[in-house]
Amino acid sequence: MVKGIYGKLMAMNLKEIESLIKEALPDAKIEIQDLAGDGNHYSATVISSQFAGKSKIQQHKMVYSSLKGKMGNELHALAIKTKEN
């Protein structure tokens, strides 16, 4: 886990999450909400043509994969909704 100088967990911000997803899915339309206002609990809707022909599980794995291991560390919770463009 990433900790700041006082030992507190450092949260990810909205723009960082969006940037990581965009890097993996460049055509994605992304809407992210901070559910609790704490920088740790987010909801993301991701729309991409790269989801075509893939199951919801495969689509969600693509999004989680884009976060490069930050899920469960800097990012505590992310509810995902995916849609094919």
Image: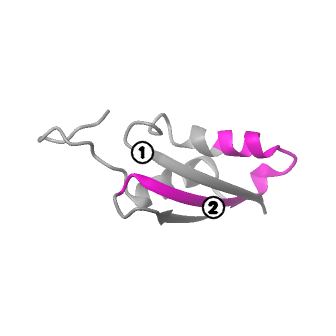
Q: Is residue 32 above or below residue 54?
A: below
49 vs 70, left or right, is right
Q: Nearer the viewer, residue 4 or 28?
A: 4
Q: Residue at x 57, y 42 (%)?
A: 66
Residue at horizontal 36%, vertical 64%? 37
Give the distance between the C-alpha atoms of the residues marked 1 and 2, in whole angstroms.
16 Å
**Residue denoted by label 1:** 75
The secondary element bearing badge 2 is classed as strand
Residue 51 forms part of the magenta stretch: yes
Q: Quadrant of residue 13?
A: bottom left
Is 47 left or right of 79, judged from the image as shown? right
Secondary-structure class at tag 1:
loop
Q: Which residue is mark 2?
A: 45
What range is drawn magenta here? 39-62
Image x and y of residue 59, in percent: 73, 45
Image quadrant occupied by the N terminus = top left
